[in-house]
Amino acid sequence: MKIVNDHISNRRSWLQQTGAGMGMLGACQVLADSSEGLADLRDQTKLNGTHFPPRAKRVIHLFMNGGPFQADLFDPKPALQKYEGQRPASADLLTERPTGGLLPSPFKFEPRGQSGLPISELLPQLSQHADDLCVLRSMHADNPNHGPALLQMNNGTILPTRPSMGAWFLYGLGTENENLPGYLVLCPGRPVRFSILWNSAFLPSEYQGTYVNHSSLDPDTMLPNLKNRSWSHDVQSQQLSLLRDLNEGYLRSRNDHPSFGARLQSMETAFRMQSEARDAFDLNLETKATLDSYGEGHFAKGCLLARRMVERGVRFVQLYYGNGQPWDTHSNHDKTVPGLCKQIDQPISALLTDLKQRGLLEDTLVVWGGEFGRTPTSENGSGRDHNHHGFTMWMAGGGVRGGMSYGNTDEFGFKAVENKVHVHDLHATILHLLGLDHERLTFRHSGRDFRLTDVFGRVVRDIIA
Amino acid sequence: MTKLLCRLALRLSKFNGLWVLLVLCVFCAPMRADEADFFEKKIRPLFAEHCYACHADGAKTIHASLLLDSVESIRLGGDSGPIVQPGDPDASLIYQSLVDAKGLQMPPEGRLPEQQIQDVRSWIARGAVMPSEETAREMIKGEIDYESSRQFWSFQPLEMAPLPEVHGAEWPEQRLDYFLLRGMEAAGLSPSPKADRRTLLRRTYLTLTGLPPTESQASHFLNDSHPLAFERMVDRLMASPEYGQHWARWWLDLARYTDRTASWLSQEGQAFYYRDWVADALNEDVPYDDFVRRQLATDQMVKTTAKDLSALGFLSLSPTYWKELKLPCEIIKVIVADEWEERVDVVSRTFLGLTAACARCHDHKFDPVSMEDYYALAGVFASTRSVAKPLIEDAMYQPVETAKKKVAELLSDVEKLKKETKEIQSKESVDGGAKATDLEMQIAAMLREVEAIKRETPYYDAPLVNALTDESLYVVRAGATPQDGSRLEYRPESRDLPLFMRGNPNRPAEMIPRRFLQLFGNERPFEKGSGRLELADAIFSDAKDLAARVIVNRVWLAFFGRGIVDTPSNFGIQGSPPTHPELIDDLAFRFIQQGWSLKRLHREIVLSSTWQQSSLATDFALSKDPNNQWWARMDVRKLTFEQWRDSMLLGADSLRSEIGGEASSLEDPRNYRRTLYSTIHRRDMSTTMMIHDFPDPTQHSPKRIGTLTPLQGLYALNGPLMLRQSSELLERLKRQEMMSVEDSVKKVYGWLYFREPTQDELRLSMQFLGQATSSVTDQRWQQYLHVLLASNELQFLD
């Protein structure tokens, strides 16, 4: 029940007084109270902000929950045509459900941009950004089941007991804007497993993700308790002023205990947050041209919100495509996918353009992908099963090389075979881009130093610009 | 790897005498060392590069049941039998597949470079020598020197410490005060004065019951000049049911309590029976050893009553991970092993302050806990199954079970008949109509029978609790091949687990009998069922001194906000050393001697001079001991969310006092119960609770990590609870006899803070309410009361 240690509050108020704020300094070195106590802080205090100069300061993760099929979009596999209906030994991999013979993707690829990166006809607008995309074709994960795979993509393990990557980012870097939560999770509904995907587990609760259901775009309802049902802004301002006076009197009677100062600060931040967060979530403040460029639909609105957030210094924005697992095409795959792609093509393209125009893309990392991919073999004729053996993700901005693909799957796109990138490697690489060494970003808990990457992970240096 | 080993060696060398790091490259026979070296240099790396993706424990789909990442499994081979015939490459399956001799090309992506194929050939031809598994094992095993490990302070036998000599001998009120005073004096500090009566009143109420006093309770104490007034108040509070309600939550943090378990589990059991059992047991001051025994193994104890079964919720409500049975059992086994690890973790940390789960993949790197120890404990949990059990005697429940079985059969028949009826109706044949009517009559009759059974079987709806039974879990293939998925099989006999190499259940080594930790000197295997009771008994016999140290420290932490040991669930070598080693030993020694009574310990602390000190620090004390290590003052602490919310409810006289029973949502506007009874849903936690530092209920939480965040600020400004409670407070005010605005302000200060407002506060309050003292609107009052509820004074404990 120990509350924020004096050390933190002193430090925090010192930071505020000197105008630095938490954003300048990683939170983990000011956090003086790990779940195992002060003794464990020794190692943690060694971290002075980032471990090395960051290439990215914030991350947008576009999460295609359900799992898109790699060979429809970024990993062309002509051999599927040749072996249509067959199941060669090398395509005889176990996935969650039984699948049959190979099922070619009907979608055409063209080399795009100066780099000639092949991208599917399903993503014509995104294709214009080919030279910014770094396509990881050799992703692989450990479990072909949604829940565990979603957990792994978020926290590195299939267990619900570990902190999510966003929590690690905040723990390592703090936030750049005290007036907004540093880690926002947008979804027009609820992804499978829900809040456990963005929890802080054994890290302090201030690092947990804040969930925003943006199926309603009313800015007042997006953050919990953002708007007062009863009191006007003026009344609140009077209340806050009385509160400050009363608290200051109390503080004097307590010999100026630093915790109280910190709490007062957080109340005032909350008060400012009401208007700042309201503005941040208010899409009506965008020009018609911008709104039009992103297009319609929840995902488009989510992309635009994501840009508004990173622009304001939110460290990590995760945008789930939709409620449940929309990309989970166990049947009618070919009929469903064009619609899904249509929903993401224009918004992602607009997001990249917009970030670039605002000079944000260079230090904002955009990550795209699902919790796994899908099988090149058919499930009941028209569907595709989950595939954790090999799938595609891509990154853009934030210090990665554009116009390249990295790694390869086998000739059918079933399994990653060359320059494989495990989810741990992805995490290690993202942390690296953020200026954090995944082996040094640790938190002592339950007798050992935990990491996002557990005891694994390699930084994929070849993709760093 | 080398880097890692060096780092490990460096770290180990810091802990002199505990570990002997074995030379890593000892091969089975010196004369063959070169051969083994060839394997390590040429063959193992080749396997790792080209084969591990499908044939190693890292590969989640293991092909042909063949593993190439351990010496043992290379010898064993896979589904097609042995892969190596030492001395005869051409007859060795592995060589055949490398050269595509039998139509089986490995690796599938293409033939290896000729040099590598030749290496394999020559390795087999020379006898396929590999280092022994023992040697390989030594890579992950140190040698634990138990004798010297036992010298560590927390593993030493307890002794009653001699009473320390102090100068200010008139200050101590309780035995513990001597130890604290000694520390202060040695540090050049002297104790702070006793806190004022009002502060003590609030501190004592909130610490013992989680609630502030009511108006009448407050005035009763503040006006009681009897010399024993404080002691009487303490005894009264410790005898009140609110005491158990508050301390139950303290325990539930450790027990990772949840009201709702995963959706795929049977939801028959009612979790709240466990929560209420904890509260009752603490109210009854069930001795701590018994309190724990009941939670681990009440079903195996002689004197168990049906009600006691609720105690098993500690383990029965453990987090359970989703097992997709379509997947091969290699994957499911890992998930099940993760669950066993969770049980080892929670039991060893909660009761012993040991992080035994660290020893799943390798011997514990710092503490004397071996992999064998880990699997000896894990076997207990592998032999334990969560079940729902009725709160009535088994004999009385027997007919209900028969009845439920019958009902299930009937309902399944009904389903079949319904399907049949539908099919007939869809066909529209000539005699179909009559047949369908006949079927429908049959269905109706069966449903009537179901109703009759339910009606006529006594105790049919008897409540079920989350309990345990001794059954062991095996993950087996559902069919002939991995493609057929997995099946969970429960068997009545208990099981020992094999040691899993690197923690991987797909790499079993020798069997480890279920038993207690070797550190505590008793290696007798457990024999009674799963061994849960023997485990509990071992904790309170062989390891009782450590168990007592751990629990008295948890109690200390709850009263002071910091433990004597600052790592409450890690009393191992990496834990914090105690700030007051004699104190913790003395407390623990007497705790055992005095019958493991938590209430007695609580009482001693509350009545101590140390705990009753003021929290006001002098500049001298602040500079001398900024972190307050010597407790020459009390710390100011933030209330838990539960204490804060309950204070707001009580202050407005709107707290409902029912005890126990089903939880209800915290966000429900009609929820006026203590926060203890708000629904905890492991997979869908209340946002309000999460932003207020409520611990993650998927895991043991040794202490709350307090934060101050803007989201909490938003809650204080706008949270529906604040608006509701300020309105409730206003209603309470309006129920009073007419009084002036000034008197009303004073009244509320009494309810919330148990004091009069200062002149300044009164002035500020009147200013806010408007000078026109006669006509303050309800709304303005509510706005004012909201501020008082959001104040620091209400949220902090002096």
Image: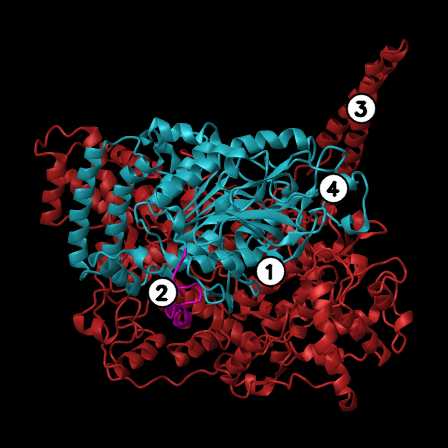
Chain colours: A cyan, B red
Crowdedness near tag 3: few (<14), some (14–19) or many (≥20) residues, C-alpha within 10 Å: few
- What amino acid type should be assigned to the residue bearing mark 3? Lys
B795 sits to left or right of A171:
left
Residue A72, image x and y in percent?
64, 38
Do the residues marked 1 and 4 share a common chain?
no
Q: How far apart are the alpha carbons under marks 1 and 2?
A: 29 Å
Image quadrant in which you'd find residue B740: top left
Picture disc at residue B342: 1
Magenta stretch mostly in which secondary structure? Answer: loop
Pointers 1 and 4 in contact (C-beta within 8 Å): no
Pointers 3 and 1 in contact (C-beta within 8 Å): no
Q: Which is more N-terminal, label 4 or label 2?
A: 2
The span shown in magenta is: A32-55
Question: Disc 2 designates what residue?
Answer: A29
Residue A434 sits above or below residue B429 on the image: below
Q: Residue at x 52, y 87 (%)?
A: B16
Pointers 1 and 2 in contact (C-beta within 8 Å): no
Question: Disc 3 designates what residue?
Answer: B419
- Determine if residue B68 is in view: yes
